């Protein structure tokens, strides 16, 4: 169970430090006349530059993850119909569909009809995928395996948008697809990952048919907690044979107990 948040003493000489330590948001930063202080302004400019870089960064699977990691999980790379980063940013629709070669490769290399398919996508922050996936992917596989689910082979989609879930569903017909994708960077962090989940996604499905766990990063939702939330949410989808607005997350911190990892997880039908 989570520990209670530390008490903040309003009369403490470290009052501002205690407040600011509770959140990555910029609060109580002070001012110089009607402007930011020089320190705050420089921090804002540095974080804005980092966010812009994160959008433009590209993932090199072997350099960023290492050959051992890729071989262990069998991760391979495919692409969407967006040709290059500029087209990806200007044409979101192209990032929602796998290209013809990708469709053939996914069909050839991934088993169909499984229970739980993990997909990695660079999205709008390659840095987030590189930072969070090495911890999150193994934990997801472990929890899903212990639940008795059949797992698909994970793969990476370059120039990826959330709608690519529909193509994966059409090609492989998994019960649940989870897409781990880099979020649009903000000024608090450029390493925030989202997990989008859908039950048997199909062409034409929109966000109303999907569920989301966001803000997965060091100062947000920790990877361990995110893995448990993802698997518990996927279990609800399998149990109810649906996803999206009709499924409300029921995970609570009290379920985050490694002594009973499989409780509340239905067996695949």
Image (cartoon, helix red, strand yellow):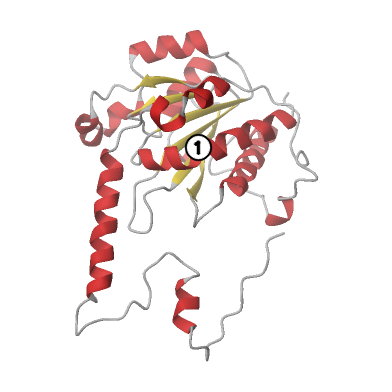
Query: Is 117 or 128 nearer to us in this picture?
Result: 128
Query: Is 78 or 91 nearer to us in this picture?
Result: 78
Q: Quadrant of the N terminus?
A: bottom right
Relative to residue 188, is residue 138 depicted above or below? above
Q: Which residue is mark 1?
A: 133
Residue 204, position in %: x, y? Answer: 41, 27
Residue at position x 23%, y 60% in the image: 45
Relative to residue 187, is residue 23 depicted above or below? below
Residue at position x 41%, y 32% in the image: 64
Judging from the image, what secondary structure is the residue with disc 1 in? helix
Apparent side of residue 76 relative to residue 223 in the rendered image (left or right): left
Residue 225, position in %: x, y? Answer: 62, 49
Q: Residues within 10 Å of mark 1 (few under 14, many from 20)?
A: some
Query: Is 257 or 211 nearer to us in this picture?
Result: 257
Residue 179, can we see it?
yes
Query: Is 220 or 176 nearer to us in this picture?
Result: 220
Residue at position x 56%, y 81% in the image: 8
Q: Quadrant of the C terminus?
A: top right
Residue 84, position in %: x, y? Answer: 23, 26
Apparent side of residue 235 relative to residue 123 in the rendered image (left or right): right
Q: Residue furthest bottom?
A: 11
Relative to residue 163, is residue 114 depicted above or below? above
Residue 241, can we see it?
no
Apparent side of residue 218 relative to residue 158 in the rendered image (left or right): right
Identify the image quadrant of residue 115: top right
Residue at position x 45%, y 73% in the image: 20
Residue 112, position in %: x, y? Answer: 57, 14
Identify the image quadrant of residue 142: top right
């Amino acid at each position: 169970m989570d520990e209670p948040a530390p008490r903040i003493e309003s009369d403490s000489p470290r009052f501002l430090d205690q407040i600011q330590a509770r959140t990555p948001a910029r609060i109580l930063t002070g001012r110089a006349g009607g402007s930011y202080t020089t320190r705050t302004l420089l921090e804002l400019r540095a974080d804005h530059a980092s966010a812009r870089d994160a959008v433009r960064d590209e993932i090199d699977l072997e350099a960023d993850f290492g050959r051992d990691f890729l071989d262990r999980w069998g991760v391979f790379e495919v692409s969407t119909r967006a040709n290059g980063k500029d087209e990806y940013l200007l044409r979101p629709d192209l990032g929602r569909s796998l290209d013809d070669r990708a469709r053939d490769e996914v069909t050839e290399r991934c088993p169909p009809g499984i229970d739980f398919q993990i997909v990695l996508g660079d999205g709008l922050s390659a840095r987030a995928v590189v930072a969070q996936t090495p911890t999150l992917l193994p934990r997801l596989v472990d929890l899903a395996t212990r639940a008795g689910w059949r797992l698909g082979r994970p793969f990476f989609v370059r120039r990826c948008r959330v709608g690519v879930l529909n193509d994966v569903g059409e090609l492989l017909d998994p019960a649940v697809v989870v897409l781990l994708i880099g979020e649009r960077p903000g000024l608090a962090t450029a390493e925030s990952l989202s997990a989008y989940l859908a039950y048997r996604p199909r062409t034409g499905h929109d966000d109303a048919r999907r569920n989301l766990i966001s803000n997965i990063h060091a100062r947000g939702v920790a990877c361990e907690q995110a893995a448990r939330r993802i698997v518990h949410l996927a279990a609800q989808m399998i149990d109810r044979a649906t996803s999206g607005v009709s499924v409300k997350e029921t995970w609570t911190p009290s379920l985050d107990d490694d002594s009973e990892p499989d409780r509340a997880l239905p067996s695949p039908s």
